[in-house]
Image: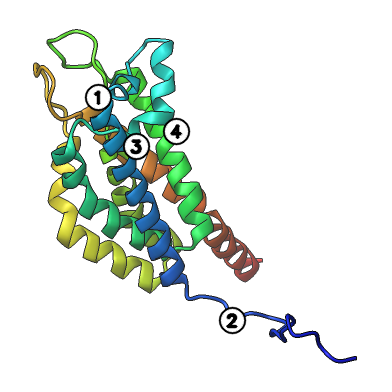
């Protein structure tokens, strides 16, 4: 039977796009979304900023969901943009599934930690934590140690490159007491801790495989 003019032959299996291309598109889309959200926030006279993490307040728990996509101003967002693009892209190289799960762990666990300790060291009473820097610190910590857990050369190399470029940023996770407003070291610290947890949990297949090999060798 002949084909009608509107029909076309297509391959049974489409060629899969390279992982780096899919990862790059994913991160670019996420960052573009942050700029759209900030544009709306600016046009609405910062109506969204009050939806951040407010420590130890029941309503402040919603900030765990919203805080990473909210920023105080354009300068705040632009300061986070390059680390988001670079670290986010490197995260996708570990696999998109791992990227999604690691991001979810850092987002939720890091946010909950910030909700618990976010008022520590503050001299100005209740605080409101917004910004994607907790996510950045989580990705940074993940990339630094994931290669050690999986013992894969490419992941270890990525960790070393990240350490060389962004290692100094980790000072931002050090406690600063007595400040009023400013940088949320609590969010940075909790994000970094959540990144370590994510790296440990998501390296389980490789760690379990090594354990089985070791057991088999000595049995």
Whole-angstrom CA distance, mark 1 to mark 4, is 24 Å
Q: Does 80 sit above or below residue 10? A: above
Q: Secondary structure at mark 4?
A: helix
Disc 4 versus disc 3: nearer the observer: 3
Label 4: which residue?
Answer: 108
User: Quarter of the image holding residue 191?
Assistant: top left
| Residue 203 appears in the rendering | no
Q: Earlier in the sequence, mark 3 or mark 1?
A: 1
Label 1: which residue?
Answer: 46
Whole-angstrom CA distance, mark 2 to mark 4, is 35 Å
| Residue 101 appears in the rendering | yes
Q: Find residue 197 and name its label.
A: none
Residue at image location 32% in from the left, 16% down from the top: 54
- Mark 4 Cα within 10 Å, few/some/many (few <14, many 20+)? some
Q: Is residue 168 left or right of residue 145?
A: left
Residue at image location 31% in from the left, 48% down from the top: 141
Q: Earlier in the sequence, mark 2 or mark 4?
A: 2
Q: Do the residues bearing badges 3 and 1 touch, measured as CB atoms within 8 Å? A: no
Residue 167 pos. (x, y %):
17, 53
In the orientation shown, which residue stands out farthest toward the right?
Answer: 1
Residue at image location 17% in from the left, 39% down from the top: 74
Q: Earlier in the sequence, mark 2 or mark 3?
A: 2
Q: Find residue 69 and name its label.
A: 3
User: Quarter of the image holding residue 113?
Assistant: top left
Whole-angstrom CA distance, mark 1 to mark 2, is 45 Å
Where's the C terminus, which quadrant?
bottom right
Label 2: which residue?
Answer: 15
């Amino acid at each position: 039977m002949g084909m009608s003019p509107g029909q076309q032959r297509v391959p049974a299996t489409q060629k899969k796009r390279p992982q780096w291309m899919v990862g790059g598109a994913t991160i670019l889309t996420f960052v573009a979304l942050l700029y759209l959200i900030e544009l709306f926030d600016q046009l609405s006279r910062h109506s969204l900023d009050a939806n951040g993490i407010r420590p130890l307040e029941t309503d402040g728990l919603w900030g765990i969901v919203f805080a990473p996509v909210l920023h105080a101003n354009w300068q705040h967002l632009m300061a986070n943009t390059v680390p988001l693009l670079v670290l986010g892209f490197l995260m996708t190289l570990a696999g998109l599934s791992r990227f999604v799960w690691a991001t979810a762990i850092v987002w939720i666990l890091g946010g909950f930690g910030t909700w618990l300790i976010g008022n520590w060291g503050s001299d100005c009473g209740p605080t409101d934590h917004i910004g994607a820097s907790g996510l950045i610190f989580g990705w940074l910590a993940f990339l630094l140690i994931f290669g050690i857990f999986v013992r894969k050369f490419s992941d270890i190399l990525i960790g070393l490159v990240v350490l060389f470029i962004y290692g100094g940023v980790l000072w931002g996770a050090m406690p600063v007491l007595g400040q009023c407003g400013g940088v949320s070291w609590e969010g940075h610290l909790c994000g970094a801790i959540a990144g370590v947890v994510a790296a440990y949990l998501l390296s389980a297949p490789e760690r379990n495989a090594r354990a089985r090999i070791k057991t088999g060798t000595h049995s």
